[in-house]
Image (spheres, grey):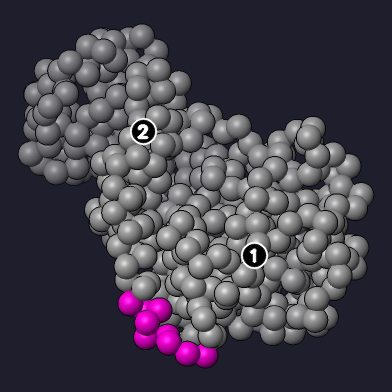
Amino acid sequence: MNQVRLSAHGGWSWQKEPISRGSWSKLDSSACMLPAENDNHHVVNYLALASVAQDTLIKHSGMASPPPLQGVRVLEFAGLAPGPFAGLLLADYGASVLRIDRAHPSAHTANPPPPTADALTRRKSSIAVNLKSPAGLAFIKSIIPDVDVLIDPFRPGVLEKSGLDPYSVLLKLNPRLVVARMTGFRRDGKYKDMAGHDINYIAVSGVLSMLGRANEKPYAPGNIVGDFAGGGAVCFMGVLLALMSRERTGRGQVVEANMVDGSAFMASMPRFAQQMPIWGGPRGTNTLDGGCPYYDTYETKDGKYMAAGALESQFFAALIKGMGIEDGCWGGRREDVRTWPKMKEIFTGTFKSRSRAEWEAIFDGTDACCTPVLEQGELRKGGFEQRPVVTLKESPGFAFKQGAKQSGDAVTGRGEGVEGDGWVSGGLRPGVGGEAVLQQWLGWSKGKQYELNNGGLEAKEESSRAKL
């Protein structure tokens, strides 16, 4: 008996591995699996069965409906930062993500190699493959027809050189595939063939020039702007848009994201505001970049920091009231930039007079827009709970906190959480968990459809659909 697969995003596909007549009630975690007497008949009956199966899945989940990406299958070529972050976001909302690592002598053994440098591995599994091996390449090609998304983190041309050209190979093997390609620089222009990192991408995007104190050099805020905000998160958005388009057209497509355009887009507001007083001055002299005294950070008596963001007049009034200073003691209106140096001097001295805890006691529960600058370590120690990035009330993502109730609040997410509670990543060892995913996705097992050779999985026999 064949089976019909109804993905969580509404698409149908046929599964060719036989299943027992009663097995459809044991719902796959990534799809509703239904029996099919004949691949060409009774589709209406299957739709009815799908509704029952979906209701059963929802009932047992304890939530209103499954995670939005349940049933989406993702192949993620191993990389660092933006590509893995896109895969992480997909996994957090229900997608099954399988990372492709390089072959390693101890991969897929009882003693796998150490975790790679990639820390963004939550809910992912791994297979190790040697793409330079014809049989390894054939193995990847044989998976492609059953995959929804492929994440390409490589520099331009690498995927093509490996024999996996998106147009002549991948989309021919699977016209519904979404090929998400993440690069640092644009794919055209003078930087396209150069190596780079976050600091380089935000430098040529114009964003880095906006960041820093007056009369100091630009500073990079870690790798948050390029790799994550303008990189992985934008790539994730592109994947979702392509999946939505596929529901309408039935076709997949190539999604190209780069960190130059992504970070530049994230800076749309300050770029537009350069024509306005709020951001019209040199770096570090404007309202939102450290120039304004009431939108800045201040050291406290115990060497910690408070953050003030009292832009509006009523919030500013609450701020200076809490600080115990009089309005206008700096000799003019607060919006007048000529008063800012004196105001900043007064604010600096005032905040230095008390500890951070004392300032917290003064400002907690007020509208002064004044909060402590909390460090990661103290947040974790204080019990701050990492949560899904977006709360979906009817179809929540997965919980981070280990031991969370299966039917937990949508705000904290569904499921039992993960080791490390979203604070610490155990990493992912090449080859760990991937064989179980291949069994779940395709019904494949080692020794039948594929085998292990020199630390990498290979197609046991090159299938006809992998001969492109």
Amino acid on which the number 2 mark rests in the picture: Ala
Give, as a single range, the part of the protein colored magenta: 40-48
Mark 1 lies on residue = 442
Tell me the SS state at disc 2: loop
Which one is nearer the viewer's eye here, 252 or 48?
A: 48
19 horizontally vs 464: left or right: left
Q: Where is residue 24 in the image (x, y as percent from the top left)?
A: 47, 64
Give how far across and how far down residue 129 sits, in percent. Answer: 81, 56
Query: In the picture, which quadrant includes the N terminus?
Result: bottom right
Q: At x 58% / y 66%, what residue is drawn? A: 19
Q: In this view, does 459 lie above or below 91?
A: below
Residue at image coords 70%, 51%: 435
Residue bearing the label numbered 2: 404
User: Mark 1 and 2 residues: CB-CB less than 8 Å, in contact?
Assistant: no
Residue 403 vertical placement versus 4 (above, below):
above
- Image quarter (top left, top right, bottom left or bottom right) of the C terminus: bottom right
Mark 1 vs mark 2: give the one in front: 1
Q: What residue do we see at 9% from left, 32% from top?
A: 317
Q: How many labels does the image show?
A: 2
